[in-house]
Image (tube, coloured by chain):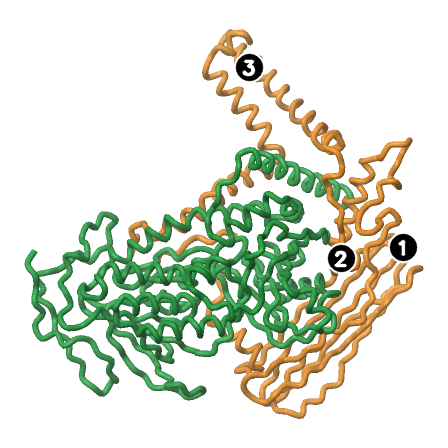
Chain colours: A orange, B green
Amino acid sequence: SKLISNHTFKTYSEELNRGETRQTERRLCVCVCVCVRKQQMSISMALFSPPISSPHQNSNLIPKISLSLLSTKRLSLVSLTRASSDNGTSTPASATVSATTVEAPKPVAVEEVPVKSPSENGAVGGEETDLTTTTTEIKFQDAKWVNGTWDLKQFEKEGKTDWDSVIVAEAKRRKWLEDNPETTSNDEPVLFDTSIIPWWAWMKRYHLPEAELLNGRAAMVGFFMAYFVDSLTGVGLVDQMGNFFCKTLLFVAVAGVLFIRKNEDLDKLKGLIEETTLYDKQWQAAWKEPESSSSSTVSSKK
Amino acid sequence: MATFTLKSFTGLRQSSPDQTRFVSHVPSSLSLPQRRTSLRVTASRASPNLANRKLRVAVIGGGPAGGAAAETLAQGGIETILIERKMDNCKPCGGAIPLCMVGEFNLPLDIIDRRVTKMKMISPSNIAVDIGRTLKEHEYIGMVRREVLDQYLRERAEKSGATVINGLFLKMDLPENWDTPYVLHYTEYDGKTGATGQKKTMEVDAVIGADGANSRVAKSIGAGDYDYAIAFQERIRIPDDKMTYYEDLAEMYVGDDVSPDFYGWVFPKCDHVAVGTGTVTHKGDIKKFQLATRNRAKDKILGGKIIRVEAHPIPEHPRPRRLSKRVALVGDAAGYVTKCSGEGIYFAAKSGRMCAEAIVEGSQNGKKMIDESDLRKYLEKWDKTYLPTYRVLDVLQKVFYRSNPAREAFVEMCGDEYVQKMTFDSYLYKRVAPGSPLEDLKLAVNTIGSVFRANALRREIEKLNV
């Protein structure tokens, strides 16, 4: 990764605070996430520019528009923030917002709140931006999600809790929240703790299939290695086990099967080894001889 | 070794360019090796006494590191000059100080705006865990305003005898010999804001660079670069009823939306809250992360007004060279910010003090000239005392800030009382406290369990994605 010059930071943060600029800079941040499903969807783009009146030479405009829409099974989240500062020539800043409206069975709530903040002339301008948004988002809802946790009684199958479906339901909830982060609220805290699902349910669902896979691999590798060594050296299986080299091979085979499960794992392991020692190396750099008169730069870990 | 008498060494004095500078040289038969080797044996005992003057040390930067260093130097009988660019600098900073700092630095309790005794850790799926049940009555995390703390430390340094100058350090001329002075070029503002100031130079024997993450002293000595995170923070004044929730509570949000390798926070300050986030690897997306942090805390900061936006780099690891001849770096300039929590104030102040103590000891209270080996003692002591802490926090960050499942496991584990006790003990008192082995074993098992469950859920999520 490139290091942004330190100078940029200073000017950036000072710029934000003072509102005076040596150059016009626009910062646009758009975050769009749309999932399209089989259902028909009509999208209309709405563009608008909020009126801007800038009585002062230096005016700061920070319109913050946040929209959130939801349809039955998909969500599109558009949020746009734009901080723009203009110089004396006062190029008008216009905020453009693209709103997607969705025709869907569920009601959709869209709120746009353009905020204009007047700023003082000159030096330190405190930008007052209101955070009042009356956006109503549709949060995660599920019949079985009651009071911030899963109602285990609704997961019963044949008189016993079906832990598999609890796990799947929690996964769905987490996936939903990853795609559509929600605000936390003191009124509806999330209290679910995954440790209420018993250990054997996890074992059965995740550990055992993987263990079976790995054991199968190890067995195949072991069989063919034993056959191979036997055909080459004539040493039988029992005698092989007494040999140090064969024991080493066995260890390597088991470790390899355990740690290298996918092709990507090889590179990941190499990266991990380097990662574990990097921080130490960075600290010990002060005690090493300087290689040249110029400063030694530390390789960046990204 | 014969003692040398310095002929007509009139000492170092501050001068403006139109005056002529008069420096005399010590007989060059005494020459210490200039190359820095790891086996240097020369100690300052061999250095000659400074005739009719005290050792003169400049501290560049008047934050916690500079203030603490200047105070210790002045108390040790050394002529100290502290150069600070902006006396009322309102630093973008979390502002959290551990309990031990109050005791060690004798801070008056009125500079602490708030005592945070509760914390909430919120996972990517909004599972919230309360931390702080194990805190005793007298234990808290102090929230301070940086401008108040910095000013207090500087004033204390001044009372101890340091000279505080409002000026901007420009550059430094490195000396050729072991005893020639450093020439500092700086602009003195003389207290007037907005004025261009007057260019001046000063000669000092040693320099402590405490000028923060963008240290110019570090550049002057070729200390090298470090990786840094950018921390972005907005100060938001929220309505009073919402402020009562944050009376003594700070929040930490983790998640890919909030930051890919750090956390988002809501820290209460004197009469407003600071909402911010940071990142190392995705600096360009910092605004997006900030929006996400605000979104996660939305209900609790609804109706608030943003009164200030600020950003600052935070070093991730120390610079390759933290000292060079008679210049040492302390605080953020050296890169003493922990990983995982991003804590820097205490370490800055402590390193400033430690470096100053090393100088005082090496110069025998200002009587002798110091050299690099004295400053190396400070580095040794620092590394010995705090490297374990840094290592542990680095491991924590590597393991638990990697991915959403790791963060979920992290939050789950923070709910455990033993974890909370150990965490607070090590944070508040800065010691890696040894716990009981049985509890450690239970903790290890629980950790593995949490990580396993979180990763299992991640696999489930991936199955749903298909």
For mark 3, does the 10 Å Cα neighbourhood hold few (<14), some (14 to 19), or many (20 or more) residues?
few
User: Vertical placement of B259 versus A117: above or below?
Assistant: above
The disc, 2 or 1, on the residue closer to the chain's N-terminal end is 1
Q: Amino acid at mark 2?
A: Asn
Residue A243: horizontal and vertical position, in percent? 47, 12
Chain to which mark 1 belongs: A
Which of discs 2 and 1 lies nearer the camera? The answer is 2
Chain to which mark 3 belongs: A
Placement of the N terminus of chain B among the 4 image quadrants: bottom left
Q: Residue at x 63, y 19 (%)?
A: A219
Residue bearing mark 3? A228
In the image shown, does B392 or B221 lie closer to the viewer?
B392
Residue B444: horizontal and vertical position, in percent? 58, 36
User: What's the mark number on residue B272?
Assistant: none
The disc, 1 or 3, on the residue closer to the chain's N-terminal end is 1
Q: Amino acid at mark 1?
A: Gln
Residue bearing mark 1? A39
Q: Quadrant of residue A259?
A: top right
User: Vertical placement of B429 versus B446: above or below?
Assistant: below
The disc, 3 or 2, on the residue closer to the chain's N-terminal end is 2
Q: Amino acid at mark 3?
A: Phe
Task: Classify residue B338 as left or right of residue A63.
Answer: left
Residue bearing mark 2? A180
